[in-house]
Image (cartoon, coloured by chain):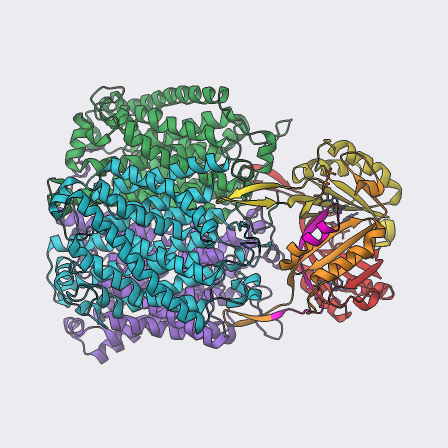
Chain colours: A orange, B yellow, C red, D green, E cyan, F purple
Amino acid sequence: MNKLEIIIKPEKLEVLKAVLDDQKVNGVMITNIMGYGNQKGYTQMYRGSEYNVNLLPKVKVETVIAAKDTARIVEAIIKEIRTGEIGDGKIFVYEIENAIRIRTGEQGEEAL
Amino acid sequence: MNKLEIIIKPEKLEVLKAVLDDQKVNGVMITNIMGYGNQKGYTQMYRGSEYNVNLLPKVKVETVIAAKDTARIVEAIIKEIRTGEIGDGKIFVYEIENAIRIRTGEQGEEAL
Amino acid sequence: MNKLEIIIKPEKLEVLKAVLDDQKVNGVMITNIMGYGNQKGYTQMYRGSEYNVNLLPKVKVETVIAAKDTARIVEAIIKEIRTGEIGDGKIFVYEIENAIRIRTGEQGEEAL
Amino acid sequence: MYFTNISLLTGSANTLDKNINIAWVVIMAILIFLMQAGFAMIETGFTRAKSAGNIIMKNLMNYVICSLIFFLTGFAFMFGGDNPFIGSSGFFDATRAEGTSVTAAFNNLSPESFIFFQTVLCGITPTIVSGAMAERTKLIAYIIFSAAISFIIYPVAGHWIWNSKGWLAELGFHDFAGSTVIHSLGGWCALAGAKLVGARVGKYTKEGKIYAIPGHNIVIGALGVFILWFAWFGVNCGSTLSIDYGIGKIVLVTNLSACASAFLVAIITWIRYSKPDITMTLNGALGGLVAITAGCDVVNSFGAIIIGAAAGCTLVFFIEFTEKVLKVDDPVGAISVHLGGGIMGTMFTGFFASNEFLQSRELTRAQFIGVQIIGIIAVGIFILALASAVLLILKKTVGLRVSRQDEEMGLDISEHGISSYADFQIKL
Amino acid sequence: MYFTNISLLTGSANTLDKNINIAWVVIMAILIFLMQAGFAMIETGFTRAKSAGNIIMKNLMNYVICSLIFFLTGFAFMFGGDNPFIGSSGFFDATRAEGTSVTAAFNNLSPESFIFFQTVLCGITPTIVSGAMAERTKLIAYIIFSAAISFIIYPVAGHWIWNSKGWLAELGFHDFAGSTVIHSLGGWCALAGAKLVGARVGKYTKEGKIYAIPGHNIVIGALGVFILWFAWFGVNCGSTLSIDYGIGKIVLVTNLSACASAFLVAIITWIRYSKPDITMTLNGALGGLVAITAGCDVVNSFGAIIIGAAAGCTLVFFIEFTEKVLKVDDPVGAISVHLGGGIMGTMFTGFFASNEFLQSRELTRAQFIGVQIIGIIAVGIFILALASAVLLILKKTVGLRVSRQDEEMGLDISEHGISSYADFQIKL
Amino acid sequence: MYFTNISLLTGSANTLDKNINIAWVVIMAILIFLMQAGFAMIETGFTRAKSAGNIIMKNLMNYVICSLIFFLTGFAFMFGGDNPFIGSSGFFDATRAEGTSVTAAFNNLSPESFIFFQTVLCGITPTIVSGAMAERTKLIAYIIFSAAISFIIYPVAGHWIWNSKGWLAELGFHDFAGSTVIHSLGGWCALAGAKLVGARVGKYTKEGKIYAIPGHNIVIGALGVFILWFAWFGVNCGSTLSIDYGIGKIVLVTNLSACASAFLVAIITWIRYSKPDITMTLNGALGGLVAITAGCDVVNSFGAIIIGAAAGCTLVFFIEFTEKVLKVDDPVGAISVHLGGGIMGTMFTGFFASNEFLQSRELTRAQFIGVQIIGIIAVGIFILALASAVLLILKKTVGLRVSRQDEEMGLDISEHGISSYADFQIKL
Ligand SMILES: Nc1ncnc2c1ncn2[C@@H]1O[C@H](COP(=O)(O)OP(=O)(O)O)[C@@H](O)[C@H]1O
Ligand SMILES: Nc1ncnc2c1ncn2[C@@H]1O[C@H](COP(=O)(O)OP(=O)(O)O)[C@@H](O)[C@H]1O
Ligand SMILES: Nc1ncnc2c1ncn2[C@@H]1O[C@H](COP(=O)(O)OP(=O)(O)O)[C@@H](O)[C@H]1O
């Protein structure tokens, strides 16, 4: 099993949800985060003083999937989310040892 | 070492904290997330228009524990949290390479 | 590749950001969490009733780095963040299977 | 549009003196109206985010329904006729009410201005209840209960005291602007309601330990308190029902009492809990206002400071008593503020009323104190019985309380299908 | 400082009667001013967090600019002279305006008090527009549009009705405190604006399905409604322009209409959507206030209840019609409340105006209803044409709408470089 | 309750004229009271979430203490007696104060109405300080400082100007409603306080670079500004102390000045920072209000527009000067608004006061301008010295500032043990 951790701009969330639905993903966890990467933030004025907004609001979407689906899903995401501009975001892939469904006690891929 | 990532309904948080305390877990990280899984959300009306609340508020509780304790703790959680209804949540188990306590520099299981 | 998950007090965030910048880290994800570890919270009064603030606000900073840099960066963090007092926080180290930059499709360490 | 003399159209007398009094009462009534905003803010601020919209809806509906019912029947039960126990004239059209007391009021002002002034006062009482029963009461049950309050509960007790032919009025009971009629009465209803609906899930552990449930927005709650204070000047000054030399005194003593009370609550909580408690201090200001309301026309500045101080001193203990001894979960402190403050104020009016006032009533101070206590008790017994009866009927029929699951989700979602703070990350 | 008789300095007549009327109008105008706070709160509360500061800025700027422009030219276009179509006296200094109507007003009060009262009324209209166009309109475009409203759009229509020599006034058209002049007019502008600027990104799917975009703070929105209601008493009572016996009736019917309307909206949404809708019920109270504004001086309590009920009944359907049929995205319901309520109220004044009033106008009821309808239509056509023309020019020049990217980021960041809630975790 | 003529009970004269003036002053004073809500909202809104409750508590306590102290001693120091430098009559019971000036005021109104009006004015000054010292000042230190302000600092300077026997009053200094007495004075105290307590942690880097700390709720801050504006009409119109023909002019010029100032700040920040700054524009409205307060009875509409414009033009630079040159951390801009605006307004009254006014004072314009400048300087030196002395004593004794750790945690937790926004996810 793998976990995909997908970091995107907030306004892309609806599109990503649609992609994951299409790919028959079973569940997601969505967290609001602040981030920076290549997109370094910007400078604003507040009451005459400059301040750096060096952290930008991002959305982190996590989904646990069967290892065999990883490549396919990653590709689908890139296809729909990419704009080619800085700040498009990243996907991190983790290995997951186990998954348990609390309701039934099922374990492993069955629990997804 | 393992990390447990436990996704539950917000109203179960107090129960889960008690379970983890009982199991002598050393620390937790709690995050508010939005999620969906088998429990798919519901439809509401706002000013005469339908809208889908397809993401439900969930709480993600992470705790890093010694690998040998994993099975026992997972069991304890299931026992206390399960209601048998959709939306009970899931536990994901990760392997952790290392843990470091910043205060002392201790590493590995000692640092938990 | 490794992911560092660094849990600190909110007021240390600026310092940590500076350390990570110094260490040429390419990106971070910052989440507000509630946590407890050795630092167990405190008791307050609200309208004459005691209540336990047993969860303290913490900041979780995640960064994905090349495995070879892990030791160096962990050391740098400890050096700058440690105060020696309870609540200084922890670092958890994960292995990461892959990273993908959505903008370009690059994979692996190149994508960081 | 303008410059037609609209009074010609209504064919009414039009003298400067009378019109000035009408204007005064209307301005004060408009101020009082704003109490609805004050209560809505304090009650949402001192409870949790997940029921905020429901509290708004309850406060809005109670005012709306009260305005309509009070016009159609409540006013008649309260002011109509000369019967000592219940009103009997003006049903379905308050402007047609007749009776010694109401006819005088209509003549001194105009029927509509007097009715509107009484409407905004009536609108306060159910709002007090809404705070004490917040976060677990069914919308429909609350709506019916508040309708019952403006239909019969408030008008009957009000009749005894504010209709000059009411039996308590005849005894010499003095409640100038509502410490008893509005606030104690609201407090008794709140007590019955909060007790019968039970505590919020999680407020008491099985072992009876109290678990504090902090309010979600202290700032908006504080705004509510300031708005109430502002509007309260309208209640106390407007109850003169005319432009009177004594207005200045009323406004000054009202303010001093509120200040003395808040000051003492700050000191007491600072000592008792080692840090000054913000929400209790805010409650303190309100407690001082409630207390001075009965006697603001007949006590002087020092009396007012002592009345406020007394209300403040007891408030902290009323709150602890309610929570810890009675085991009643009153999220916003409504019972302690309105019932506690109301009783203190009505009683202390006995101690500090001016000698001139006692002479005008032809009562010795001891007699007057006795009458005040009779009034407090009579209203208490009557309201507690009547309110409990209504609530018990509701419990058996529509049900008082939402399901545990609905309560945990929050009443905004379960009763209205929305979240009041859609864009904010809420900790449930 | 004190105790110099400042009137001596200004060399003006000083009689008690007149001064009391001035005081009355000034107090009511001060209440009306607070509408700016009410609108700002309701409009921010019912939209998203990411544009909250921008709405504040728009509301602030519109009042500021309106106050200056109305003093310099708007008042002259509205009240100056005796021409039936457009005002012509008092440019660059409203206090110098002359004409049958304005001279009478200046003499009954003082020029400045009358001008200030009219200024705060004028300030309402552009604020209505701001809500309907929220979250996607360029700041500069909105500012110019609202300047145009106070410069010419509002004054000309106002002249027809509120200058006693205006052609609609001469016909016998009755709009006591602005159902048409202020609210329908603002509603027409809002309709033109919201249509031409287009819906917010994400409001309608490509297939035309509606996607609800919930407001981010129902509590502050509700506070706004209560504040508006409070200030509305100022509008309706103050429009007497003198301390009049009829004030009591005005305040009572105003309140009853608002209550009847809110009550009906609650019931209808409860039945129609199975749960009572909070924000629509809040809109309902406002709709009842808009509707009673035209005739509050000439209808009785029962007329008011029916007018409010009619406004409430239709409001829900106006909202659905606007969103679903016209495909106009009006985040706060401004069009339905102000245009819908304004038309209903102006028309229903025809049905419920007292016979005395009709006699004083020398019109049969049928004739009077006809005149009311003529006024509604004339204002509608004129405003829709004029407002659309201004908006189309703006579209071609500065542009009406921010870029899609700016809209998605939110207008707070894109237009002002700040976040209105810097310390809160916001869900974008 | 009603219909006893309460004046009979107090045995006081009762004439319509006098009573109307009392009513006027009481209504205006009630409006002014609401400033407490306005300041509380603007100060919490423009600072961080983690200290919001503490600001509420400070504002509440300062009003509470000020009301009590001013009644007991402040009023006596300010209005009692005929000494040119300090008051001397009415200690422990303000209603017993005597002296040429105060006796006249008591006779024209009633003692209590005049005292209450002065109390709510006095309550403004410490509130100004609270904003400038927010987020790092110890509660106890602030409370003592604000007690000192109402005990002696404000009354003495006020005595010079508003007691007709004060030395500045005798010179012909004119400050109608408090540009200097209230606002400059509060501003000087704020300057001393903010300087001595030091900047918030993180405001300035070691290299002296400024790090902006955005306010946490622009919406509630804006609500505060609108409420202040509303209440300000009470200050300026109420300072007539009677129903006067000139009220209309006062309300109109007050509004025009605020609008001109806000408009200019919007333009200047738009040009200077490329985007219009919302919080500075809101400050701008307040700056215009402060500035017009001194001369609102003696300048005309165009004078008012210029005074507002001048206040607006300078405000932006005052703010930058305070932050960048003086290195004073004033989170809400209190110093620039109140001190800057107060000085501008007092001076500009010299330029724009009407000729009639100058004649009545028997001063040439040059002389009058000179007197105004003397007043500004005298008050500045006196207050800066006295306030600094009090603050330095506090620094040595209870301490002015919380520990760095407490400040980082936020004053809500460290001083009160609560979080003001318990259900919201806060970014610390
Ligand atoms: N090495 C990293 N470790 C952790 N998070 C990262 C890393 N690189 C990027 N991110 C996260 O991904 C987000 C988007 O990355 P960014 O570099 O802006 O995208 P792009 O490469 O398309 O320009 C960042 O805001 C950050 O939160
Ligand atoms: N495959 C998954 N990947 C990531 N998160 C998941 C996955 N499945 C479930 N979750 C998370 O767990 C929560 C509860 O899961 P759910 O399927 O509703 O539980 P149950 O299986 O008991 O019905 C979801 O809201 C979601 O956040
Ligand atoms: N075993 C653990 N699993 C998950 N999170 C932990 C664990 N131990 C500590 N933490 C997180 O790290 C934070 C700081 O840990 P703490 O024990 O207070 O630090 P210290 O060891 O320096 O006293 C905690 O609040 C918690 O969120």
Q: Is residue D340 shown left or right of residue C35?
A: left
Residue D406 screen position, x and y as percent:
58, 33
Residue D162 screen position, x and y as percent:
26, 28
Q: Is residue D94 shown left or right of residue F185?
A: left
Residue sitting nearer the eye, A61 or D113: A61
| Rendered view: C69 above or below D270 | below
| Rendered view: D107 above or below A89 | above
Q: Visible in this render: residue F267?
A: yes
Residue F158 covered by magenta stretch = no
| Residue sitting at the far right | B68
The magenta-colored residue range is: A18-42
Residue F253 screen position, x and y as percent:
26, 66
Residue sitting nearer the eye, E236 or A76: A76
| Rendered view: D148 above or below E424 | above
Q: Is residue C53 shown left or right of residue E378?
A: right
| Rendered view: F366 above or below F173 | below
Residue A35 covered by magenta stretch = yes
